[in-house]
């Protein structure tokens, strides 16, 4: 006769041995190491997103909803922008450093992003960007 113990699958918890909860912030040498690796690999989008995240401390949902017109005035990347947060509906002033402005400029030129399009287009908002492009004619 078989025991029921043979049919019970015993699995370990997903977080066993892992650091859970709030993680310690990145240290300055770690930030620079990430930036240098992204620059050497020519990952323009990732570098622009990373730099903007470090500068702004905005939630990712707020960063990916940014449009090119939110951070530029013509061909110039703004030094300071005002963003309305999605979660709290409060305005936040964001200072954009020279390094981040350079990364954003490089990303915009690399992808030939339009003024009304998303700054970080993805497969979900790419159709919105196409429609916005044609509506500007």
Image (cartoon, rainbow, N blue to C red):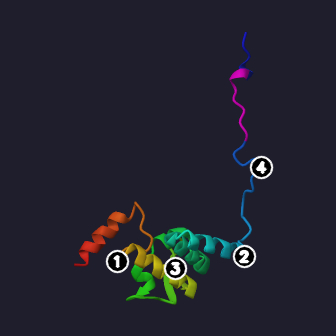
Residue at which label 2 appears: 29
Q: Residues within 10 Å of mark 3 (few under 14, many from 20)?
A: many
Q: Earlier in the sequence, mark 2 or mark 3?
A: 2
Q: Separation of disc 4 and disc 3 at Cα?
A: 37 Å
Residue 67 seen = no
Q: Earlier in the sequence, mark 4 or mark 3?
A: 4
The mark closer to the camera, 2 or 4, is: 2
Residue 134 sits inside the magenta stretch = no
Residue at which label 4 appears: 17
In terms of depth relative to the viewer, which is nearer, 89 or 66?
Answer: 66
Quadrant in which the C terminus appears = bottom left
Q: Earlier in the sequence, mark 2 or mark 1?
A: 2
Residue at the extreme top: 1
Residue at which label 3 appears: 103
Residue 84 seen = yes
Residue 55: percent from the left, percent from the top? 60, 80
> Is the magenta region chiefly helix, strand or loop?
loop
Asked if the residue at tag 1 contacts the one at tag 2, i.e. Cβ–Cβ closer than 8 Å, the answer is: no
Question: Is disc 1 placed on a helix, strand or loop?
Answer: loop
Residue at which label 1 appears: 114
The mark closer to the camera, 1 or 3, is: 3
């Amino acid at each position: 006769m078989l025991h029921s113990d043979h049919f019970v699958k015993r699995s370990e918890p997903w977080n066993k041995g892992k650091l859970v909860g709030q993680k310690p912030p990145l240290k300055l040498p770690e930030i620079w190491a990430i930036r240098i690796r992204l620059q050497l690999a020519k990952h323009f989008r990732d570098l622009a997103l990373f730099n903007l995240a470090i500068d702004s401390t905005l939630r990712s949902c707020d960063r990916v909803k940014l449009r090119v017109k939110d951070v530029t005035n013509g061909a110039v990347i703004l030094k300071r922008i005002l963003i309305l947060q999605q979660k709290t509906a409060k305005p936040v002033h964001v200072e954009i450093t020279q390094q981040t402005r350079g990364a954003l400029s490089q990303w915009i030129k690399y992808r030939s992003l339009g003024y009304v399009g998303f700054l970080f287009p993805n497969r979900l908002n790419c159709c919105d960007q196409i429609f916005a492009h044609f509506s500007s004619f």
